[in-house]
Amino acid sequence: MWNVPKSSPEFWRPAASPAGLAARAGTLRRLRAFFDERGVLEVETPLRSRAAVPDDSIQPMGCEGGYLSTSPETAMKRLVAAGSGAIYQIAKAFRAGESGPWHNPEFTMLEWYRPEWSWRALMEETAALIQSVLGEMTVREYTFAEAFQAFAGVDPFASDTDALMRALSVPPPAGVDRMGLLDLLLNDRVEPGFRALGGLVFLTRFPAERAAMACVDPTPPATALRFECYARGVELVNGYQELTDGDEQEARLAEANRKRIAAGLPSLPLDERFLAALRAGFPRTAGAALGVDRLVMLALGAERIEAVLAFPEDRA
């Protein structure tokens, strides 16, 4: 929404205060220093691509010649496949319709990849990275099953849909499926539990249906080898043991397009260069993405993202 009219005396001013801008600059310095000290190479990839990763929960912004990047993931994986070694990038990303206290359609993402690492080693590095900015804090881990049992009183793999609906504090929308109910419960019951705990909480072992670009452990119940990290109750990092099979990845992306079509959304062109990179020999790799604006908000104690952006959507 473009909600600062020209008649307002605030029309031209930045949203962030000098303190907010200074906190942002300080956080970016700390992030770069963290990776520089560990020998991780900083890279840059294009903001525009001919393709976009299909996901019914993420809407890309179209532009002349393709789409603005929703994440540098596929381009960075092409670098890893070409032998770049460990890399990181602090990049702008764009997602249509994402506005709110913790969201801006244009935002800053830190993404990094560690060839020959496990996702659990990456969890340890993630905790160290966040604490390098926010200071020491307690670190906890809950599997998806443990978290739902502890905070919602249901088993996400075994409880029937009636039990899942009863666990919600408000009735779900009509027609929501089982995975949709789990998403609602995560927001309604589990994440408030994480906020009450404070510190860092790692949520691991998601249902296989939420694997996206992560490997899956087929041992029943099948789970994705991925994690989300919450800092003081705020979802901050998403990490994967990255899928290396190009054929499996293409099948998942095609299925994601089918879901988009079923939801009334347009299908998106697949990134054939990315799929070719996987097929050329993508090494065992762990990777993660962190919301930089949210990290700065936590460092500053801000309640709205505008406090750490010079020119958010309504002032751009």
Image (spheres, rainbow, N blue to C red):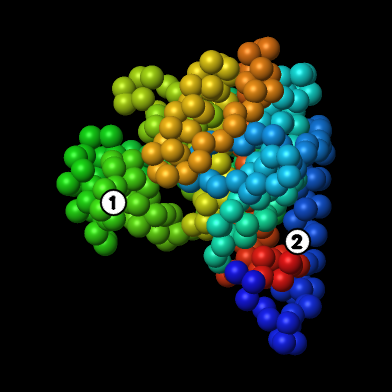
Residue 249 locus on image (x, y percent): 53, 22
- Tell me the element at label 2: helix
Residue 306 locus on image (x, y percent): 66, 69
**Is residue 258 visible to us here?**
yes
Tell me how many marks there are: 2
At horizontal 62% and vertical 60% (from top left) the residue drawn is 104
At horizontal 39% and vertical 54% (from top left) the residue drawn is 187
**What amino acid type is highlighted by mark number 2?**
Arg
Q: CA distance from mark 2 to mark 1?
A: 36 Å
Q: Nearer the viewer, residue 308 or 129?
A: 308
Q: Residues within 10 Å of mark 1 (few under 14, many from 20)?
A: many
User: Which residue was labeled with disc 2?
Assistant: 24
**Is residue 146 visible to us here?**
no
Q: Is residue 204 above or below residue 272?
A: below
Q: Is residue 75 above or below residue 162?
A: above
Q: Nearer the viewer, residue 298 or 208?
A: 208
Q: Nearer the viewer, residue 202 or 61?
A: 61
Task: Pick out the residue farthest to the top.
Answer: 280
Q: Nearer the viewer, residue 114 or 164?
A: 164
Give the left or right position of residue 38, taking residue 136 as reference: right
- Residue 152 - label: 1
At horizontal 81% and vertical 52% (from top left) the residue drawn is 29
**What amino acid type is highlighted by mark number 1?**
Ala
- Residue 116 - label: none
The answer to whether marks 2 and 1 mark residues whose Cβ atoms lie closer than 8 Å is: no
Q: Is residue 243 above or below residue 307?
A: above
Earlier along the polypeptide chain: callout 2 or callout 1?
Answer: 2
Residue 114 locus on image (x, y percent): 68, 28
